Amino acid sequence: MSEAAAVGTQPSRREFLRRAAVLSLSGALWGRRGVAGANNRLAVGVIGTGAMGSAHLAALTALPNVEVRAVCDVDGERLNRAALRTGRRAQGYTDYRAMLEAESLDAVVIATPDHQHATLAVRALEAGLDAYIEKPMAWSVSEGRAVVDTARRYGRIVQVGMQQRAQPHFRQVVELVRSGRLGEVKLCRCWTSARPDPPRPAAPPPPALDWDRWLGPAPYVPFCADRRANWRWYWDYGGGTLTDWGVHLIDIVHWAMGEDQPRTIEATGAYDATGAYDATGAFETPTRLEVAYDYPSFHLGWSQNGFRGLPDKEYGILFYGAKGRLFVDRKGFQALGDGVRLDPLGPGDFLLPRVRGHLEEFLECVVTRQRPTCDAAVGQATTTACLLGNLAFRLGRRITWDGAHERCFGDSAADRLLSRVPRAGYGH
């Protein structure tokens, strides 16, 4: 065979995530300790009710054995809409701390901007709750480590929102690579052509928005409509495309290759509006970025708005094996080369169980106390790789990474950027 592909339709990123959340909860969920019943439902709170939070909220409210008991958002208008989606059965809060103190919950779903993820997660875990955390798991390496350590200390369940791991064809690709169907794989490439939305014009703050709480642990700045709407492209709140799309794609490479700690990282990039990186421009994170990762047994290249392994594919992953190449995206996968066997895997191959969905897997693990596919340690490794790509770009030099101790070898300046001091009153 020269090519073989899994069939399906290509959803947009937001539609893909929405479908994953809704479909994952379309079946019945066991009640606690395996007994379903009206008085035996999981009590869940949702923190952050924007695009992803709303998708999760819709999925949760459709499940009979889950009770959305509380919703939280620093924007009163969004909070009101979220409460309406629950038929006003959920109590609304503008301060997550008040929610954690007042409500008797089993778990929370955290879907705020990136810079709040770890702070909220640590507080929830310390309060005895399990947590589903949207990706990336944390804004910094040290914050992510705090999530992992807190989850272990309190025996809590964490699932990070890298939903591709729940999709059957991504699991099949991992099985094929790990079972040697490509032969030895020494190179992997990930790419995307995603770009930020245009900058938003200046506008007064919405009356119902608590801007101070929106900023949370980030440094204080006066309200800026674009920072709120396009927060992902400002270093104080996100990490641009690499911590958005990169988390999803690089995570699959880690899973398939069985390695998640790069040894060295180098990066170059630019912001298209000026022809060169310019932190005083409309956004701070680069539009174009090339990152070269060296792992113990393979090399990984990340590219945004540059290299495409297949010119007609807007995004995807390519595994380069001795027997051929394997491409995968959210539509399916495709073998390139006559030497790649796609016949069914057998007992001697690397096999993965299938799950009904990413969010549903989390809820089932809340019941069974088994670690889910995207446990906190998985989220930390993938998030860290993406953060290091950005760090190498900002420093303009190669980073040598000590994964065992989560620090840079002989580079105190880089180490200082692995964490930050949160604003007073907003630390974890």
Image (spheres, helix red, strand yellow):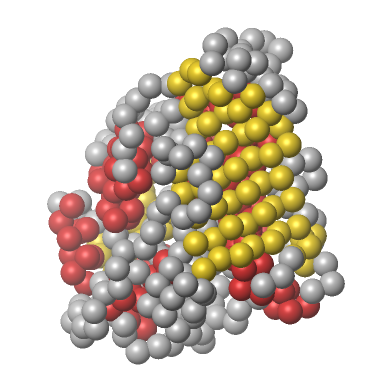
Q: Is residue 261 left or right of residue 101?
A: right
Q: Residue at x 21, y 85 (%)?
A: 204
The residue at 20%/79% (across/down) is 206
Question: Which residue lies at the image location 57% right of the left edge and 14% below the top edge?
Answer: 342
Q: Work out whether residue 244 or residue 289 is closer to the camera in this orientation and state it.
A: 289
Residue 340 figure quarter:
top right
Is 149 placed above or below 409 here?
A: above
Q: Is residue 402 left or right of residue 312?
A: right
Corner quadrant of residue 105: bottom left
- Residue ranking furthest to the right: 410
Taking 402 as reference, is 103 left or right?
left
Quarter of the image for the N terminus: give it. top right
Query: Is residue 77 in view from this perspective?
Result: yes
Q: Nearer the viewer, residue 237 or 312?
A: 312
Q: Is residue 352 above or below residue 64?
A: above
Image coords of residue 309 (percent x, y): 53, 40
Say how many tags the image has. 0
Q: Nearer the viewer, residue 32 or 389?
A: 389
Quarter holding the C terminus is bottom right
Name the spot of residue 372 as percent of width and height, x first: 55, 39
Q: Position of residue 34 (x, y in %)?
A: 45, 29
> In this view of the protein, can residue 102 be seen by the observer?
no
Q: Residue at x 18, y 69 (%)?
A: 77
User: 387 above or below 214?
Assistant: above
Left or right of 54 on screen, residue 300: right
